[in-house]
């Protein structure tokens, strides 16, 4: 199981709920944007700006559950993948192992949170 991500300070702060979501995100230099002009084949992506801020862009034309899953997927990349490896954007990346693993982590977190409510 890949729920050790829930023990990281960012995830603890997001789940705690005592600090507003956007304040937590800004504290970790993460900016979240919902974009309605993305093609349906792009659910979301993350990039790092020249100033070192992380930007998560989510497709605003998909349902909320999908947006949450994509958000968790991208947070996994920020917390676990970016520090370990350089990251690149390409076509059909959903088929490589790093993307499959981020999908699995996001799904496990959603299932865990649903079961704990």
Image (cartoon, rainbow, N blue to C red):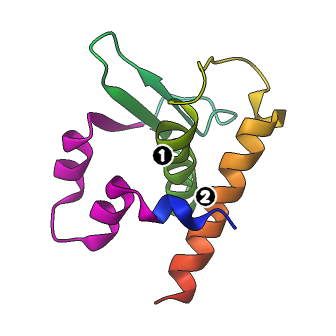
Question: In the image, what residue occupies the spot 40% across and 57% down?
Answer: 8
**What mark, if any, has residue 15 been given in the picture?**
none
Q: Are marks 2 and 1 in contact (CB under 8 Å)?
A: no
Specify the quadrant of the image occupied by residue 32: top left
For marks 2 and 1, the one nearer the N-term is 1
**What mark, if any, has residue 106 been given in the picture?**
2
Check the image and report above or below for 63 versus 78. Answer: below
Q: Which residues are magenta?
A: 7-34
Question: In the image, what residue occupies the spot 58% across and 35% down?
Answer: 81
Q: Is residue 105 left or right of residue 20?
A: right
Question: In the image, what residue occupies the spot 48% across and 46% down?
Answer: 75
Give the image location of residue 108, x and y in percent: 65, 68
- Number of residues whose C-alpha sits closer than 10 Å to that of mark 2, classed few (under 14), some (14–19) or many (20 or more): many
Question: In the image, what residue occupies the spot 63% across and 18% down?
Answer: 89
Between the residue at mark 2 and the residue at mark 1, the CA separation in whole angstroms equals 9 Å
Q: Secondary structure at mark 1?
A: helix
Tell whether position 16 is magenta.
Answer: yes
Q: Is residue 109 left or right of residue 57?
A: right
- Number of residues whose C-alpha sits closer than 10 Å to that of mark 1, classed few (under 14), some (14–19) or many (20 or more): many
* Residue of label 1: 75
Q: Secondary structure at mark 2?
A: helix
102 and 85: which is toward the camera = 85
Give the image location of residue 65, x and y in percent: 55, 63
Specify the quadrant of the image occupied by residue 99: top right
Give the image location of residue 1, x and y in percent: 70, 68
Q: How many marks?
A: 2
In the picture as drawn, the residue positioned furthest to the top comes out as 50
Give the image location of residue 93, x and y in percent: 76, 28
């Amino acid at each position: 199981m890949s729920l050790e991500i829930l023990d990281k300070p960012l995830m603890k702060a997001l789940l705690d709920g005592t600090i507003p979501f956007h304040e937590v995100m800004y504290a970790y230099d993460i900016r979240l944007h919902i974009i309605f002009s993305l093609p349906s084949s792009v659910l979301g992506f993350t990039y790092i700006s020249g100033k070192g801020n992380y930007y998560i862009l989510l497709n605003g034309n998909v349902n909320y559950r999908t947006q949450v899953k994509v958000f968790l997927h991208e947070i996994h990349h920020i917390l676990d993948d970016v520090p370990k490896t350089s990251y690149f954007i390409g076509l059909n990346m959903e088929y490589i192992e790093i993307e499959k693993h981020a999908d699995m982590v996001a799904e496990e977190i959603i299932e865990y949170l649903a079961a704990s409510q």
